[in-house]
Amino acid sequence: MANEPVLTANAPAPIGPYSQAIRSGNELYVSGQIAIDPATGEVVAGDVMEQTEQVLKNLCAVVKQAGFEFEDIVKTTIYLMDMYDFTAVNTIYSKYFGVIKPARSTVAVAGLPKGVRIEIDAIARKN
């Protein structure tokens, strides 16, 4: 089984030497998504809630392009510039996931690409 790169115009193009995601059989590994509007290529203005909304839209676009659904996500990692944003991020994050939420790690970091406040990566699996 070969690894297949995933690319969609509905999420930001990679800003480095990586793929938006790699599909490997029934698994999908989605690179960290940040709050870039794919239509403009610019970071969305606003607070961490607006940035989280854009990040999750981007994540959803990549997942769907690969033929997966949001419900197939089994693990996410959230990278935050400020852990005080944790509650605000959860408010938006919880709107995207149903009853069964993926496993998750959340870590504070010293910096993120383009000065964004949040980045999220994901692993999805189809049964």
Image (tube, rainbow, N blue to C red):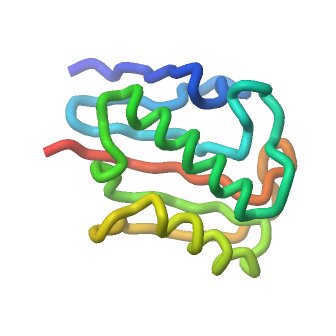
Please state, as top left, top right, bottom left or bottom right, where the N terminus lies in the image. top left
Q: How many marks?
A: 0
Q: Residue at x 86, y 49 (%)?
A: 45
State the image quarter where residue 83 is shown: bottom right
In terms of image quadrants, where is residue 37? top right
Q: Position of residue 28 (x, y in %)?
A: 35, 38
Q: Is residue 56 above or below residue 103?
A: above
**Residue at coordinates 80% horizontally, 44% vertically from top-left?**
44
Instruction: Tell me where residue 80 appears, x and y as whole percent.
Output: 71, 65
Side of 110 where 1 appears, left or right: left
Q: Residue 51: x percent and y percent?
A: 72, 54
User: At which x and y percent is residue 72?
Assistant: 28, 49
Give the answer, above or below, for where 114 lies relative to 108: above
Q: Quadrant of residue 88?
A: bottom right
For this orientation, the residue located farthest to the front is: 95
Relative to 3, does residue 97 appear above or below in the rendering? below
Name the residue nearer the viewer: 34 or 25. 34
Q: Residue at x 33, y 46 (%)?
A: 124
Which quadrant is home to the C terminus? top left
Pick whichever, 17 or 53, lies toward us: 53
Horizontal side, residue 81 vs residue 4: left or right? right
